[in-house]
Amino acid sequence: MKNILMVLFCLGLAGCATTQTYGTKNLSPELIKESLIKGKTTKEEVKKLLGKPTSTMITDYSMPKINLPQFGKSGIVGSQEYDMSKVMPYETWTYSKIELHKVGVTPQGFLFYSATGSLYDKRKTTSLSVCFDKDGIVTSYSFMEF
């Protein structure tokens, strides 16, 4: 009787091996490489492709132009003015996706649940940050999976 209850308990806890996805479901390295073109892709195109971002950040630079020294063989030989608004992102959008893989009906699945209290034995997180200039054009992006 105890063995039957233990088997039913394991089946109820573990169920079938499944994956649940939260966040931006179509986030993949292939899609990003094909679709995001630095200097060309617009905010509207990114929104159409990936939907509403998980978070946004807007940075307003109060010092848009700075003078940086120019170095030569004899040290500082002059300075050059840089427009920081062209090299620093004005707006950054972040997208994320979390995939949770559920433990299957196995002795290992039961042991994993017993040790951690979690029905999920594997988690995969994907994150994308897209930087735009003041005109809403992609200047850079960072893609990470872990």
Image: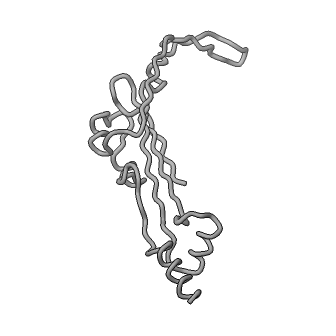
Residue plotted at (60% across, 77% down) = 108
List x then y, in percent, for residue 87. Answer: 48, 24
Asked which colour scheme the image uses, the reply is one colour
List x then y, in percent, for residue 14. Answer: 50, 73
State whether residue 73 is above or below residue 122: above
State whether residue 126 is above or below residue 53: below
Specify the quadrant that holds the C terminus.
bottom right
List x then y, in percent, for residue 101. Answer: 48, 65
Q: Who is closer to the viewer here, 106 or 97?
A: 106
Specify the quadrant that holds the N terminus.
bottom right
State whether residue 63 is above or below residue 57: above
Report the number of discs.
0
Is 41 displayed left or right of 120 in the figure? left
Q: Residue furthest right?
A: 74
Is 42 displayed left or right of 122 in the figure? left
Q: Residue furthest bottom?
A: 1
Is 35 displayed left or right of 103 in the figure? left
List x then y, in percent, for residue 89. Answer: 45, 27
State whether residue 42 is above or below residue 12: above
Residue plotted at (40% across, 49% down) = 23
Residue plotted at (50% across, 75% down) = 104
Q: Quadrant of residue 55?
A: top left
Residue plotted at (48% across, 13% down) = 64
Q: Quadrant of residue 86?
A: top left
Q: Quadrant of residue 95?
A: top left
Q: Who is closer to the viewer here, 8 or 41?
A: 8
